[in-house]
């Protein structure tokens, strides 16, 4: 049976690296994001490397859109073996002035969308002893210095959402372990080359993160890793 990975929140950097890494290991790759042009270019690049890929446009902060896109991927590429969740929303930079909708958006993308994707893929994940792989950021670390920096740079909503996602990973790992479904997170602690966070001084390669995800998925022991 063919193996399929959904790469949610696809773009240059980490998600592209994961798509390529898992594709080289024989996975079909479903890349998902809101921007059709970005998806088209990504799918063509993967296909040029000999990787079977499909592009699917969806808002991953919309639960119904997540349910729909999982169904479309399954209909196009077959059962879901793994999910890589790379989506995030930078909304609600200042929690004291942010509109409620912006606060909800940050959590909808980080927590609700991921949870719904797992729910919709659950039967496939269990049947194939698959995996859920989550990109997270250092803003989610519970530490006074991190909190101070998040406030300083206007990343309060992202920091809150990352912390919630960090907890979600642990809960999903515990819940799904008995079903043979691996859940793991890579916490990225510095800027990654080729991403919007790269202001010219990034040192972390996306391929390094992608390799770590593959290592975690293969070993299926450690739930969390930090890089950078």
Image (tube, helix red, strand yellow):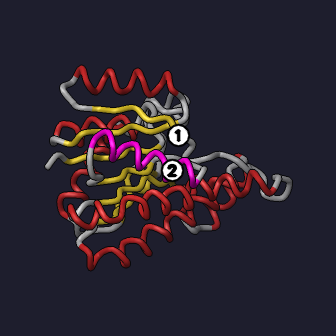
Q: Position of residue 152 (x, y in %)?
A: 73, 50
Q: Position of residue 163 (x, y in %)?
A: 56, 64
Residue at (57% x, 55% y) in the render: 63
Q: Position of residue 120 (x, y in %)?
A: 42, 59
Residue 209 visible from this viewpoint = no
Residue at (83% x, 53% y) in the render: 99
Classify residue 202 as left or right of residue 127.
right
Q: Is residue 70 magenta?
A: yes
What's the distance in space between the residues labelled 1 and 2, CA to CA? 7 Å
Classify residue 20 as left or right of residue 41.
left
Q: Nearer the viewer, residue 161 or 182?
A: 182
Residue 82 visible from this viewpoint = yes
Residue at (53% x, 40% y) in the render: 58
Our reading of the magenta stretch's main secondary structure is helix
Residue at (35% x, 53% y) in the render: 83
Corner quadrant of residue 128: bottom left
Residue 66's disc number:
2
Which SS class for mark 1?
loop
Q: Count residues near mark 1 (Cα–Cα under 10 Å), then give few for <14, some for 14-19, many for 20+.
A: many
Residue 58's disc number:
1
| Magenta stretch, residue numbers | 63-77
Residue 119's place in the image compared with 101, above or below, is below
Classify residue 192 as left or right of residue 151.
left
């Amino acid at each position: 049976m063919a193996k399929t990975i959904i790469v949610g929140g696809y773009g240059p950097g980490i998600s592209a690296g994961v798509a390529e890494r898992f594709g080289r290991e024989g996975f079909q790759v479903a890349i998902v994001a809101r921007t059709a042009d970005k998806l088209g270019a990504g799918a063509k690049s993967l296909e040029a490397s000999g990787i079977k890929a499909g592009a699917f446009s969806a808002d991953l902060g919309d639960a119904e859109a997540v349910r729909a896109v999982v169904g479309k991927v399954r209909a196009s590429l077959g059962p879901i073996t793994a999910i890589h969740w790379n989506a995030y929303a930078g909304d609600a930079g200042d929690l004291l002035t942010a509109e409620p909708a912006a606060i909800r958006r940050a959590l909808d993308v980080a927590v609700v969308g991921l949870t719904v994707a797992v729910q919709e893929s659950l039967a496939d994940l269990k049947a194939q002893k698959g995996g859920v792989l989550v990109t997270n950021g250092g803003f989610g670390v519970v530490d006074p210095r991190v909190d101070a920096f998040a406030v300083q740079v206007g990343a309060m909503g992202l920091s809150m959402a990352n912390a919630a996602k960090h907890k979600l990973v642990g809960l999903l790992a515990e819940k799904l372990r008995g079903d043979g479904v691996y859940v793991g997170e890579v916490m990225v602690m510095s800027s990654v080359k080729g991403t919007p966070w790269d202001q010219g001084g990034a040192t972390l390669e996306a391929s390094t993160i992608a390799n770590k995800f593959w290592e975690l998925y293969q070993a299926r022991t450690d739930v969390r890793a930090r890089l950078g």
